[in-house]
Amino acid sequence: MNARKKAITVFGIIALLVGLNFMVFQIPGIAEPVSNSTETINNSAPDGVGGIMGGIAKFISYTGFRNATPGHLIMIVVGLFFIFLAIKYEYEPLLLIPIGTGIIIGNIPFFQDGGINLQLGIYQEGSVLNYLYFGVVKGIYPPLIFLGIGAMTDFSSLISNPRLMLLGAAAQIGIFLTLIGALYLGFNMPEAGAIGIIGGADGPTAIFLSSKLANGGIINGVQTQNLIGPIAIAAYSYMALVPVIQPPVMRLLTSKKERVIRMKPPRSVSKLEKIIFPILGLILTTFISPGALPLLGMLFFGNILKESGVTKRLADTARNPLIDIVTILLGVTVGASTQADVFLTGGSILIFILGALSFILATAGGIFFAKVMNLFLSEGNKINPLIGAAGVSAVPDSARVVQIEGLKYDPSNHLLMHAMAPNVAGVIGSAVAAGVLMSFIM
């Protein structure tokens, strides 16, 4: 059986199941939902033939076929699409496969009643998914992700050419422009702040800030919606689509002459510099933006473990099993939070639109600032504007995109190490921006 026949068979089965749902289980009188009264349910023990038929009807009323809605089916298709992108095109598979599977898990329909808690859904108190989701709601997972990132990151390119840090800072303009756009579209200030951080292209930071500013609670006297799911999905979706979104923007905003600019090789960085950098970075950035302490504290701590040379076991744990475990839990629970009745709203659509615009603006901000810097640099010290696109903190994918684009115009011009400087600066910049937003809003 070839691939086309297999695909037709799979879609045929799905169509059959959907047909059963709407042609059989939704017909009045067949498998009517059990009464909303818990007393009726408890007293419906099988008694003869009538009891058996009642038990069958009750079983059917609990099945996903009986409780499915078009929203559930739409979200399941979205989950399958995420998995397809991850496997077929290898777009951030370590993120999209857990998130895609989580979307499917979160949208398996089950019977819900005000008096009955089956403890199945992610929003049902006492369920396993609800306990795992606690790490998202309370912002526990993002700092652990940052610990692993810090243990994997080499800041040498940034240390050797500190001026490139400005490109990472410039790319954060997407955050603040998106905040203004969200306010214009009717979101309140805390919600707009959480939505704006999508422009930083940093999933953990987006989750962390939305858990503080848009968690369904009252922030500084303002009632907020629970936007953690839509913001997280938007942030990770655009991170995965870096190879699709960024290249057209890079080509549009740069000339052929600019794309072939050669930069001097980064200088060699000593071990002492590598050790001092995360210590100074931790102190300076958290003094400027204390709200970013959970993220930046763990980021620089992970880097100290790596660069100290005496905590290899701890560094290996942080950058391998720990970050893998947390990524699995974060991806699945964020995906499961897209329960159709919660996720499929007009607000979620607006968030996805704003997220795309913020990502484009952030990319453009880094490129434009590189062009501005070149106005003041001598001929031999100019910056290739393509690396400005790496100012968004999608590490290391954005830097890889810069490398690929640069090689298209000059096969011998390798920009990866140069692009890593604004790329890691973007991670720091987005976390600082999150802390600044918290200080202004909370």
Image (cartoon, rainbow, N blue to C red):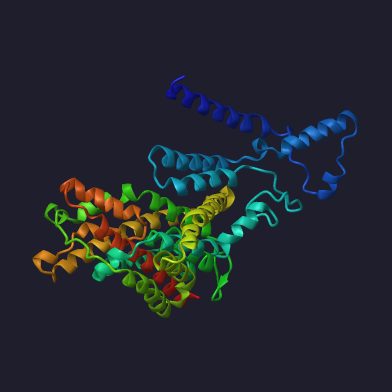
Does residue 347 appear in the picture of this structure? no
Q: Which of 244 and 39 is in front in this view?
A: 244
User: Which residue of the protein is positioned furthest toward the front in this rendering?
Assistant: 310
Q: Quadrant of residue 69?
A: top right
Position of residue 203 measured from the top left corner of the image (x, y, whole percent): 44, 58
Nearer to us in this view, 43 or 209: 209
**Residue 161: x and y, percent?**
24, 68
Identified at 25% across, 51% down, the residue is 403
Would you say 16 lies left or right of 118 here? left
Kindly identify the residue that appears in the image at 39 percent across and 70 percent down: 433
- Asked where in the image residue 226 lies, by quadrant, the reply is bottom right
Q: Is residue 80 above or below residue 133?
A: above
Q: Of all residues shown, which one is farthest toward the top?
A: 1
Residue 132 to residue 187: above or below: above
Q: Residue furthest bottom?
A: 287
Q: Quadrant of residue 377?
A: bottom left
Q: Where is residue 329 in the image (x, y as percent from the top left)?
A: 56, 53
User: Does residue 158 appear left or right of residue 305 in this picture?
Assistant: left
Give the side of residue 304 with respect to residue 159, left or right. right
